[in-house]
Image: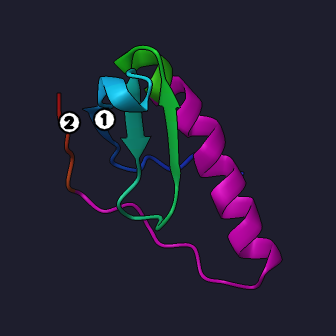
């Protein structure tokens, strides 16, 4: 499978929610992961992207192409 590069938004999680960082993929609704550091969240989101795409294909849904926007919240 060709690797697709999707923009990822990384933002800190509140301490009340355990802290760490949340990574989301705006182009893929509901695709998210987290990690103790921004780097860990980004590494983890790669697996979530693959799983999201596989599930969409299994269900016969279209997989959106990556947008050109890039974002990083800290």
Q: What secondary structure is marked by label 1?
A: strand
For this rendering, which residue is in front, 42 or 37? 37
- 59 left or right of 31? right
Crowd rating for badge 2 (residues with CA inside 10 Å; few <14, some 14–19, many 20+): few
Q: Which residue is mark 1?
A: 10
Give the farthest residue toward the front: 16
Q: Which residues are magenta?
A: 42-68
**What quarter of the picture does the C terminus occupy?**
top left
Q: What secondary structure is marked by label 2?
A: loop
Residue at 75% x, 85% y: name it. Answer: 60
Q: Which residue is mark 2?
A: 72
- 18 left or right of 11? right
Q: Position of residue 73 (x, y in %)?
A: 17, 35
Residue 18 in which image quadrant = top left
Q: Position of residue 59 (x, y in %)?
A: 78, 81
Q: Is residue 37 above or below residue 70?
A: above
Residue at 40% x, 48% y: name it. Answer: 24
Q: Earlier in the sequence, mark 2 or mark 1?
A: 1
Crowd rating for badge 1 (residues with CA inside 10 Å; few <14, some 14–19, many 20+): many
């Amino acid at each position: 499978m060709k690797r697709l590069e999707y923009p990822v938004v990384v933002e800190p999680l509140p301490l009340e929610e355990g802290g760490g960082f949340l990574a989301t993929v705006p182009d893929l609704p509901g695709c998210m992961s987290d990690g103790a550091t921004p780097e860990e969240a980004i590494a983890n989101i790669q697996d979530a992207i693959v799983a999201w795409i596989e599930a969409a294909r299994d269900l016969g849904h279209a997989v959106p192409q990556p947008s050109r926007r890039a974002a990083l919240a800290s």
